[in-house]
Amino acid sequence: MSPRDANQPNLSKRPDPAPAGTPLLQVEDLHVDFRSNGRDVHAVRGASLTVHAGQTVAIVGESGSGKSTTAQAVIGLLPGTGRVTSGKVLLDGRDIAHASRREFVALRGSSIGMVPQDPMSNLNPVWTVGFQVREALRANGLDKGVNAKARAAELLKEAGLGDAERRAKQFPHEFSGGMRQRALIAIGLASRPRLLIADEPTSALDVTVQRQILDHLQSLTASLGTAVLLITHDLGLAAERAEHLVVMYKGQVVESGPALEILQRPQHPYTQRLVAAAPSLASRRLESSVVRANVVRQAEHAAVEAHEVAVAESLADLPETEEATPEVIRVENLTKVFTIRGSGARGEKLRAVDDVSFAVRRGTTTAIVGESGSGKSTVAQMVLNLIPVTEGRVLFDGVDITTLDKRQAFDFRRRVQPIFQNPYASLDPTYSIFRVVEEPLRVHGIGDSTSREARVRDLLDKVALPASSMRRFPNELSGGQRQRVAIARALALHPEVVVCDEAVSALDVLVQGQILTLLNDLQAELGLTYLFITHDLAVVRQIADDVVVMQNGKVVEAAPTDRVFEAPQQDYTRALLEAIPGGSIELGA
Amino acid sequence: MSDTSVRPGQEHFVAPLEETPLRAVDAVDDSAPPSSQWGEAWRQLRRRPLFWVSVVLILLVVVVAAVPSLFTSTNPRFQTLADSLGDPRDGHPFGFTRLGEDVYARTIYGARASVVVGLLSTVLVTVVGGVVGAIAGYYGGIWDALLSRISDIFFAVPLVLGAIVLITSLQSRSTLTVSLVLSLFAWPQTARIMRGSVLQTRSAEFVTAARALGLSRLQVLVRHVVPNALGPVIVIATISLGTFIAAEATLSYLGVGLPSSIVSWGGDISAAQTSLRSAPQVLFWPAAALSVTVLSFIMLGDVVRDALDPKARTR
Amino acid sequence: MGIYIGRRLLQMIPVFIGATLLIYAMVFLLPGDPIAALFGDKPVSPGVAAQLRAQYHLDQPFLVQYLLFLKGVFTLDLGNTFSGQPVIDVMARAFPVTIRLTVVAIIVEAVLGIVVGLLAGLRRGGWFDSLSLFVSLLVIAVPIFVIGFVARYVFAEKLRWIKASVGPDPTWSQLLIPGIVLGSVSFAYVLRLTRNSVAENLTADHVRTATAKGLKPGRVLTVHVLRNSLIPVVTFLGTDVGGLMAGAVVTEGIFNIPGVGGTLYQAIIRTEGATVVAFVTVLVIIYLVVNLLVDLLYAVLDPRIRYV
C-alpha cells in the first residue's frame, strides 16, 4: 500500500476541506485546569502552537511544564479532573477544544493518533498484540474480518517488527520494550491519522534502541505524510527530530520558533538555561584541568594520612602497604552469576558480570556506562560489598573487601558510601531529614547529640539545603532536593569513595545540571573519589575522568573520557555515542 | 527538515519575562508546615466524616465495656419471671427477655465480652502474624518456605469451623480461651499481608542505603523495614477487630462460645431466636449493638486504608 | 504446565497432612472422653466402653490412630457414626445439598457483586458509589446469623414465600433465599473488589491507549476495563468456595437445611470425633483442590502468569 492509498479511507470521514494554507492543528491560548483538594491547579496557561500538515513539531519541557497536558487536551484525553477552561484547539480550522465524546471517538485513531510514553504499561497485558492492532483498524472502519489479520501483521512489519505474523499472536509480556514501542507505533499509525501525538515515545528505552525507533518513526511518518507532535524533555532529541520547537515552562509557552534558531540563539532566560544545561557531546568536563590536578594531589595527600590512621586503628592486622596507592579501588576479574528460576545446581544461570577489571584513581571520577542489562549496577553493588562476589576480587586501598571480617566490613562502610538512582525510594519515608542525615553518625557512634546536630546542619548547608528542611520529611521535598539529602547522608561519614548509581538519571535537566555541579564542587572541596554508574554518555562527559563501557556483563572499552569521546575504539562505544540525541548539533549560549 | 522558511503561525516567539517568574532552581518551599507521612495520613483522616463517626462510636463502646455501671444500675442477670418477654416500660426501655432479664442492661453489659475478645484476638494475631510475616518476608529462603507452609496449614482450616472444633474439645471457656482459639486460626492472614508488605519494602533503595551505612540485617529490619511495612497491617488489624467480635458472637450464637454466665451479645441473640415472633425487640437490641460495633471498626479500617494508600483514595 | 501442577500437588501434601493432623489432634488429643460423652451422664459398662474404644481405635497410640484414619481416607472407609451409619453415606446425603446451596450463593454474589461494583467503580465518589460502599459495609458488619433471622422472619413468616424449615432434599427455589443469605458477605467483598479494580483499571495507561485508538466507550469498558478487572474477582470467587461451604454451618442451621454444616454441627456437639474429622478433612481437600484450580484459572485469565 503506498502512502497515498493509505490516506484514502479517511477522506470520506473528514469535514469539508479547510481553505488552503490553514494549519493542520492550531492551539490558541489554551488553558487547562485540574481540581485537586478543592483547589484549581492551572496546568496549562495560555499555550499556543501551530502544526502544519506533514510537519514535526516538538514541545520541550521538564516534568510539570504542561507539555503532556497540552497534547492530551488536543486528543481529548485529559486525565481525572482536567478540563479545558478557555482557548481553542483548531483541527483543520474546526474548534475541537470542547468537542463531545462522540466527536472525539470519531477523531481519535483516524485523524489524531497517539504513541504513548511507557511501552511497558500501554499495551493491555491480557490481549495479543495482533488483537490490539486489529481493534484499532476495526474501530475506524478499516479492514474488518479476514483481511484484518493480514493487515495487522503488515502494520507491525511496517513499524519495524520482524517475523510480524508470529509476533502478532504473542502477548505484550513476550515483547521487549523496544518491540512493544514498535507495536504501539503500529497501533498509532494503523488508521493513517494526519496528526500523530508522540508523548516521550522512547524515554523508557535504551539509547541505541531509542535511536533506531525514532529513525524508523521519522521515515515512516515522512513517507505517510503524517504530522507529528513530539513531546519530550530532551532538547537535543527535539532539535534533531523537529523543525519547530515549542518550549514550555510551568504551564506556559516561554519560547517557540525554528528548532536551530532556538537552540543556537535562545532568547528567553529559561530556554537559555535549558540549552546551557543540556548535556550533549559538545559539553566538557565541568572544570579546568589545573584545578583537577590539584584535587588529585590533595586527595592523595589526605589519603596517605587517612591510611596511616586507618592502619594504626582498625586495619592493623592487615598486611601493610608501603604507601597509599593512587588507585583507591581495583577490580580484578570480577564475576557475578545469578541463579534465575529454579534453585541449586539445576537452576538457570545468568552471568550478570563477566570477568570485569578496572581501576579507580583517587580523587577522580570513573564512570561505568552501559545500557540496561549490561551489569553496571551489579558491579556497583559488589564494589559496595552489598552482594557477594562469585569470582574475582575488589581491592579497596589494597585490601580485598570480600575477605573482610565483621569489624573491618563495618569500617569499610564508613569509607565507601552510595547514592542511588530513585530519589523517591532512597530515603526512608518515615524518617525526618534530620534523622536521615544523622543516622550514619549515630550508627557509627560519632559525636554526641549536640555535635551531631551541628554536623547535620553543616552537611545540609554543603548540599545547599536550608537548615529549616531538617524537620521536614522526604515526601515534602522534590526529586532534586531528596537527591541532595541523599548526598548529605553519603557524606556524613567523610567517605573517601562515593558510588553514584544512576544518581542523576531520574531528575529534570536543570536539576540534573545543578546536582552534577554540586557533586563536582564537593569532589574538589573534599577530595572525593566517585564511581559513577550511568546509561547517559552525555552525563559522563560532564563529570568523568575515566570511562568503562560495559555490554552484556563484559567491559567493552576502558579509557580516559576524552579518548573515548574523540577516538572510540569499539563499534559498540561508537554506536552509543552516535545514539546521543542532538549530539551533532552545536549548541548556543 | 529541509524546509527552512518559517511557516505561518511558527514565527520565533519569546514570552515576555514578567509572565514567568523564574524561581531559583529547586528551592525548598518554606511556606508549608513540616509533615510526616503519618501526618499526611492524619490530615486526610481529619477531613473524613466517616472517620469521626466511627471513632466516636468506638469510644462509646469502649467506655460502655469498661464501666457499664455508668449506663445502667440494673443487674443484667436479675431474672423476674413475671416480666418474661415483657414490653418496654419505665426504667426498662428495651423490655425483657424470656427469662425476665432487662434487655437494656444486658445489651450494655454484653459490650465487655465483645470488646475484650476483639482486642485480645487482634493483639495476639497482629503480634504473631506480624512477626512471622516479617521474618518470612525479610529473611526469605528456608524461613519463608517453612513459615509459609505452616501458615498454609492453618489457613486451610476455615476460621469458624476450626474454632468450633477446637473449642468444643476445651474444658473451660472464657474470653481468654475464645480469643486464643480465634487467634490460632486467624494469624496466617496477617502473616501473609505482613510478608507481602515486607517483601515490597525490602527491595527499596533506602533499605540498601541503610545496609551500606553498616546496619546489621536485624537493625535494618527493625528500624527501616517494619515501620514502612506496617500500614497494611494496621488496616487489617482494625478491620479484623470487627470480624473477631462477629466471630465470637457467631460462636456464642452456636452455643460453643462464651458460657452463659458471661453476658454476651451473641449468647443473647441465640437465646432470643426462640421468641423472635412474639418479641422481636429482644433480638433487635443486642443484634443492633453488635452490628454497630463491628461496623465502626470496619468503617475505621476503611478510612485508614484510604488515608494510607493514596492510590485507593477517592478523587 | 504439567510440571507446575505436579509441583503444586507435591506442595499440597504437607499442607494436607498438617491440616488433618491439626484437626485430628484437636478432636482426639485434647482431654475429654468421647465415649463418656456419647452416653451423656449415664454410666457406661466398662465392657461396652472397651468395645467401642477398640472400634474407633481409641486404645491405640495417637499417631497410629491418625495413620489408620489417613488409610481410611484413601480407602474411602471413614468409619461409622455413633448411630452406626457409615460416615461416607452421611456425606453422600449432606454434600449435594450444600453444594447446591453454595452454587446459588456463588451465582448471586458474582452477578450482583460484579454489576454493582462495576457501576460504583465507574463513578467513583458519586452517590451510587457511596451508597453501595455503605451497603457493603453494612452487610459485612451485620453478623450472618442476624441477616439470616431477618430473612427467615421476613420471607418465611411474614411473606410466606418460603418454608421456614427447608428439610431434606430441597429444591433450587427453596435454596434461593438461604443462598442469598450465605453469599451476602462475599457479595460485599466482590462488590468492593470489583469497584476498586475497575476504578484502578480506568486510569491504566493501556485503557487510555485503547481510547486513543478511537474505540467506542462501550468497547473500551468491556474489552479493556472489565476484562482486566475480573482477574482478581474471579480469583476471589474461586477461593471463596471453600469458605462458603464451611460457613454454611450458620445458614443451614437457621433454615434447617440438612447439609454439611448442619450435620457437622450436630456431630461436633455430640463429639462424634470420626464424623467431625471426616467432614473437616473433605472440606480441607475441597479447599486445597479449589485453590489449585483457581491458580490454573488465574493463568488462563492472565497470560502474564507463567508456570514457574
Image (spheres, rainbow, N blue to C red):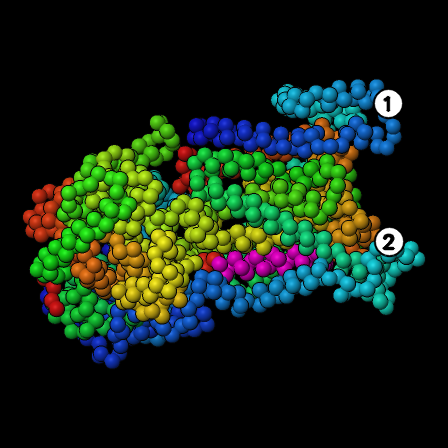
Q: Position of residue C74 (x, y in %)?
A: 62, 22
The region drawn magenta spans B287-308
Residue at numbered disc 2: B98
Q: Secondary structure at mark 2?
A: loop
Kindly indicate whether the residue at mark 2 contacts the one at mark 1 (C-beta within 8 angstroms): no
User: Seen in the image, is B25 located left or right of residue B97?
Assistant: left
Q: Is residue B61 magenta?
A: no
Residue type of the residue flagged with mark 2: Arg
Asked whether C295 or B243 is in front, the reply is B243
Which chain is disc 1 placed on?
C
Does residue B15 sit above or below B163 in this rendering? below
- Residue A56 position, x and y percent, is 20, 61
Q: CA distance from mark 1 to mark 2?
A: 40 Å
> Foreground residue, A534 or A408?
A408
Rate crowding at label 1 as few (under 14), some (14 to 19) or many (20 or more) other CA atoms within 10 Å: few
Q: SS class of the residue under badge 1?
A: loop
Which chain letter matches label 2? B
Residue found 18% across the figure and 39% down from its top: A357
